[in-house]
Amino acid sequence: MDHTEFNDDVDGLYDGTYAGLPIAVLTSDDEELPAADQAAWRLSEHVYDSEENFEQQLALFLEKVDTTAVKAVVIGGWEDAYDDDSSKVVGLLAENAARLPALRSLFLGAMTSEDCEISWIQQSDITPLLEAFPLLERLEVRGGSGLRLRPIRHENLRVLRFETGGLPAEVVRGVGGCAFPALEHLELWLGVSQYGGDATVADLAPILSGENLPELRHLGLQDSEIQDEIAAAVAAAPVVARLESLALSMGALTDEGAEALLSGQPLTHLGRLDLHHHFLTDAMVKRVEDAFTGVEVDLSGQEKSDDDWRYVAVAE
């Protein structure tokens, strides 16, 4: 797994590819379609005004594309996504799982801020997707409002990402309670309490133990207003010893958190340490650079505190 392929720009998906495949948009016109397994198929309706609802889009997709060969699906907007949750979309996908036996990569809620601000996207329980697609290898979700995940076991998931301005503690505990024996890449944008990001370091404990994540190689605990506390917990976390890359970026990391990383367990085995968007002083930036000379360290996006007020990269 190449962990460098992930872009934590909230709109990064819109470079025209997903899961290594060009994104194809299905229309009702009789255009020539790419081979089913040579595209990531985007299904989306306008959030504010749609002439065709998601159910109709899915029916057209099932009719016009050989869905038995489809490897990747990108779910964009659904009408009134700021008001109506994703449960109907999740249910329709789960109900039609037998029509998508080759599906390996799924993105739910791939909307730009013009479609719907990330913290306005109304999500729901996504556990049915993991239950309906036991061969799924990659699941990514944007939006944390109303999001839920029940603890389950999934044998094949390799990538799990949550892009949110506020990830509910219930979801963090759900991830920690799941058994993911194949998971290599876990990325949580924890966000802020104002938008439902109420997870504590205690909620992260099962993840940091690594007991249910034997193959984990990248861990991202990002975009948090308690980034210093998270850094201190990570500095002593058992899971870190097996990681190849670590991201504590996008949050309110200060010298206190960086000091914890420097004085904790050795991190020089990492190939990459991502701390971008931080509030470190110049002196601490220099100390981190000197301590990790053999590691690719991203210290870009040095921010300045405003009367001790610090902000995360992605909130609303």
Image (cartoon, rainbow, N blue to C red):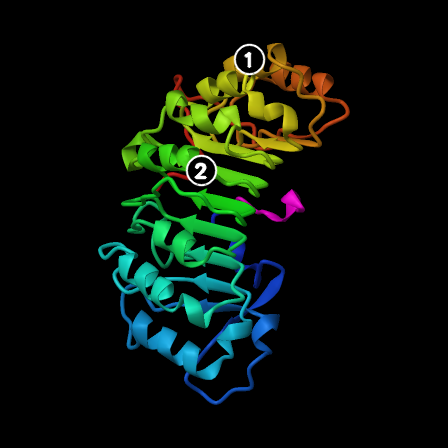
Magenta part mainly helix, strand or loop? loop
Q: Over which residues does the magenta segment extend?
A: 1-8
Nearer to me, 296 or 168: 168
Q: Which residue was labeled with disc 1?
A: 260
Q: CA distance from mark 1 to mark 2?
A: 21 Å
Q: Residue 163: where, in percent of width, then height?
A: 44, 44
Nearer to me, 32 or 111: 32
274 displayed left or right of 135: right
User: Which image quarter: residue 80?
Assistant: bottom left
Q: Residue 7: where, in percent of width, then height?
A: 57, 47
Q: Residues within 10 Å of mark 1 (few under 14, many from 20)?
A: some
Q: Residues within 10 Å of mark 2 (few under 14, many from 20)?
A: many
- For image coordinates 59% across by 79% down, the residue present is 34
Question: Number of labelled discs?
Answer: 2
Which amino acid is tagged 1?
Ala
On the rendered image, what quadrant is the C terminus found in? top left
- For image coordinates 40% across by 53% down, the residue present is 131
- Numbered mark located on residue 31 in the image: none
Q: Residue 112: where, in percent of width, then height?
A: 42, 56
Nearer to me, 247 or 284: 247
- For image coordinates 41% across by 56% down, the residue present is 108
Q: Which residue was labeled with disc 2?
A: 189
Mark 1 element type:
helix
88 to 269, vertically: above or below: below
Is 3 one of the magenta-colored residues? yes
Which amino acid is tagged 2?
Trp
Q: Residue 202: where, in percent of width, then height?
A: 38, 21
Mark 2 element type:
strand
